[in-house]
Amino acid sequence: MTDRRVVYSTEQGKSNKPQKARKTPVGAGSKQGVRICYERKGRGGKIVCVITGLPLASEALKALSKKLKAALGTGGAAKDGNIEIQGDHRQKLLELLEDQGFKAKLSGG
């Protein structure tokens, strides 16, 4: 009875099999590219456009956010690698990002 296989252990997780490593980090956006999505949920009914998948460092992300906010005359923020712009400006954001050299797509409702 000493040849039992360990089914669960806190040291190694649920099984003894090693976990597969991901080829790309979660949220990297390497395959999907730049997406402009429309969100209202969890924001008190306020509409926000969220730009995800931008391959920029945090300082460049903040600079791009500032340019977009100034061009649209609205508020927003650069958070967690994404840019949030207040209001529904999807078409204008699409044009502005393409002018900056990004290939963007509209996503969501």
Image (tube, grey):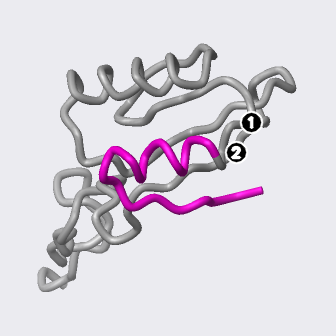
- 48 or 44, which lies in front? 48
Q: Distance between the residues labelled 2 and 1?
A: 7 Å
Q: Where is residue 16 in the image (x, y as percent from the top left)?
A: 18, 74
Please identify the quarter of the rendering in which residue 23 is found: bottom left
Badge 2: residue crowd in 10 Å (few <14, some 14–19, many ≥20): many
Mark 2 element type:
strand
Residue on which the image places disc 1: 88
Q: What residue type is labelled 2?
A: Tyr
Q: Where is residue 107 in the image (x, y as percent from the top left)?
A: 63, 60
Query: Looking at the figure, which quarter contains the C terminus?
Result: bottom right
Tag count in the figure? 2
User: On the picture, is 7 further left or further right than 18?
Assistant: right
User: On the picture, is 11 further left or further right than 7?
Assistant: left
Q: Which amino acid does label 1 sit on?
A: Asp
Reply yes or no: does residue 106 show up in magenta: yes
User: On the picture, is 98 further left or further right than 75?
Assistant: left
Mark 1 element type:
loop
Query: In the image, what residue occupies the spot 20% across and 71% down?
Result: 19
Q: Where is residue 108 in the image (x, y as percent from the top left)?
A: 69, 58
Please identify the quarter of the rendering in which residue 17 is found: bottom left
User: On the picture, is 20 further left or further right than 107?
Assistant: left
Residue on which the image places disc 2: 38
